[in-house]
Image (cartoon, grey):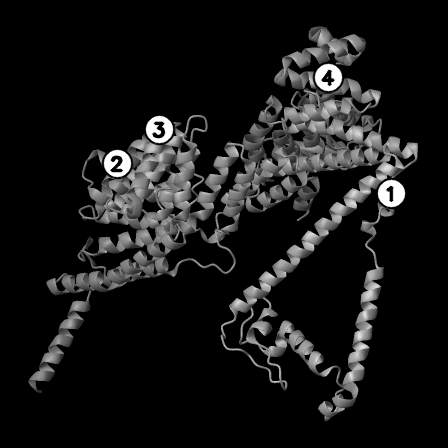
Amino acid sequence: MNTRKKIILFLLGLFVIACSVKKDKFINRNYHALTTQDNVLYNGNLALTSGLEELELTYRDNFWELLPVERMPEKQENFLPGEKKDPNFERAEEKAVKAIQKHAMNIGGKERNPQMDEAYLLLGKARYYSNRFVPSLEALNYILYKYPESDKIYQAKVWREKVNIRLDNNELAINNLKLLLKHNKLEDQDLADANAMLAQAYANIKIYDTAVSAIKIAKENTKINEQKARYGFILGQLYNQLNYPDSAYTAFQEVIDLNRKAPRRYVIQAHAQQANMFDYEKGDTLAFVEKFNKLLKDRENRPYLDVLNYQLGYFYDNLKKDSLAKVYYNKSLRTNLPDRYLQAKDYTNIASIYFEEANYKTAGKYYDSTLLRLEPNTREFRQVKKKRENLDDVIKYEEIAQQNDSILHIASLTSEAQIKYYEKYIEKLKKQDEAKAKLAAELAEKEANKAANATTNSNAITIKNGTTPISNQRVSSMMPPGSNESSFYFYNQAMVAMGKAEFLKKWGKRAHVENWRQAAIISNKINTTTEENEEEKQNNEEEEIVNPAYTVTFYTEQIPTEQKVLDSIAKDRNNAYYQLGLIYKEKFKEYKLAANRLEKLLTLNPEERLILPTKYNLVKIYEILNPDKAIAYKNDIITNYPSSRYAEILKNPKASAEDESNPENVFTKLYKAYENNEIRKVQPLVKQKINDYFGEEILPKFEMLNAAILARTNGLNAYKEALNYIALTYPNTSEGKEAQQRLQQDIPKLEKLSFTDEDLASWKIIFPKTYTEGSNYENLLKPLEQYIKDSNTTNLSTSVDVYTLTNDFVVLHGFTSKEKAKGILSYLQEYKAYKIKDVAYVISSENYKVVQINKQFDEWLKLQNN
């Protein structure tokens, strides 16, 4: 055997020996440490870094809320169809697992490979960024348990608390991080990371002042510029939460001063935050406009034009310069960038401007666009939706008022005046139509020019037809936008049409025969003449057709003349003005608009039934806007309608409280009946009173009572819907606030209730009954009460519970076990003294509660049958 073979065999043997993870030798330890560090972990850390870089590119911060201190990938359940999680984090985890499985040297209960702590740290990080927090915690805890002397121990502790925060263990994370920071052993980036996560934990539990201290330390100790900018921005947001505007302004200015050291998004958003703090009474408006115009012109800011234009629009909106505000809001929308909430703000602000201008149709369209960009099931979505629904009534009544006003005005004119009126209108209409036609032609020409410029072939396309070439410009001008020279000729309808026109111009009509050119010599002239005659005939026919909208009779024939019809139109118009006044007053708190509509109504000779409530509502409106006018209307009601309920209320509010017809007394009476379980009697009366007291202050109380009735008769969903209506329609009343509180606190608890199979300690026997008027269920209640008396027990009792408007339950309460309830039911059905034949069921008190709250008796029955 030669020397070379000996060396190869020696090295091969050495390699085999070194591969063993069971031998605690120098060569083994160093081989596995080196392989782990420079191969497996190196590639794993590269994958982790690539994943974080990809995350930075794809992650979109929501600057409308307090930013988290670090970005996280979306959870799997939030992915859109076709989206996949980043494979880099999976690859990092695979490398960490490979390092542990192939290179761990656990000999005698001690790890001999010094790179294993790094492997477990990488494993914890990879799992963390894959949103697998419990497995991540296991890997990090393993480092703390197995490698207490590791140089990565403090980093592992910080990462463990990051995981705890993600698992909502904020208090535990705070205690551990405070203990870790107390020893002063953290430095540089580890210190920054620990304080950043401490700030996050405090922010999560809304202790913002302590979060400020922690984020400041993190900002000072990090060496990463992106983190400096992010932490500085969060600092400004925290100051805003604490209502320290000066400190917030300074924090945002520090972010701006970082300039190119900070990612541009933070700088632009810092400018936007400062803009939101602008003092519109004392601030320098010229400097504000100059600053934002400069930002708009900066090429670096092109990806953020939506934010900058929105801020300028909001600025002009606050200055009541509506036309400029709309211009910049629309510019913000036209950038078509992905911040859907910003788009929603643009749309809702434009809608508010149009609403104030009484352009309700347009406002409604913008509110519709707002709803498409807001997340459903949020309070803001519900508020906009309710406002949009209320706007339906406004649009409806405004259209009725305007249209009927116009009809009545025209009907009151003489025939000559009507003709003059419509002649002017027709002249105006023709000009508008001409302008539209001209604009359409200009747009068509513009689109044609765009298409021409879009073609990439600069040479003329010549179609040889004997003498006349068709230039590239002429052909491409007929092409639709987006087409290109590679398109097949006959797939392009514009080019085909152009070719046909050129052919007809030169050759006239041709039969599909051979030698068509020679045939043309004879027939071309005849065909051309026929064509000209047909065109002339068509033109004459077009001249004879007159647009009906351009004739006076088209309009005058539609004017109503019968007094009965005119009276009906006037009645509808007056009711529309009254409804508008109430809607503006109660639903929108637009007191000036409400007063305008109600005062307009009083000038239109309304029906008697509308005069008093109109004047009373004007008293209430002018108590807010103009006390002198309120006194004038009050005196008018007392003087001219002394015996009315409104006069009694205005003269002596305390005395009116004793009147049985007083709304407060009516409500008290109905509420007592509701408490006495007279649900079916109360329900129609409450609905009637909601209509009777429309527009009055007591209305929210009746709405809350109606919601309670719906809960008893229709279940949780109807109750939730009714509470939502009250919360959004009457947000400033105590009832509206109570409804909102119930939606946030009570409804989620009730929605979590579900049927249970547990062996509970409280049971009932229920007898389902169909309700008919006069039902008292005496035939069933009598033997049940007799049994309670005979059994000499105080635990049992009976009740008649309303289930729905058409069904009841007769209930025997007080059983401590299911078996006992079943035994007594069997006894009641079989013993001759009782002989109860009614259908009955044994149910736990918990399940009966679910049945009543959700109206799910049928669902419960199905579960019993399965």
Q: Nearer the viewer, residue 696 or 846?
A: 696
Asked whether residue 168 appears in the rendered view, the answer is no
Residue on which the image places disc 4 = 616
Q: Which of the two labelled residues, at mark 3 and mark 4, occupies the earlier sequence position?
A: 3
Tell me where residue 358 appears, x and y as whole percent. 66, 34
State how far apart marks 2 and 4 are (Cα): 62 Å
Q: Secondary structure at mark 3?
A: helix
Residue on which the image places disc 3 = 246
Asked whether residue 71 appears in the rendered view, the answer is yes
Q: Nearer the viewer, residue 576 or 413?
A: 413
Residue on which the image places disc 2 = 217
Mark toward the viewer: 3 or 1: 1
State how far apart marks 3 and 4 are (Cα): 47 Å
Graded by Cα atoms within 10 Å as few (under 14), some (14 to 19) or many (20 or more), the crowding at tag 1 reads some
Q: Identify the residue at image location x=86%, y=35%.
A: 411
Tell me where residue 357 appears, x and y as whole percent. 63, 34
On screen, residue 436 above or below 29: above
- Three-letter amino acid code of the residue under disc 4: Tyr
Q: Quadrant of residue 119?
A: bottom left
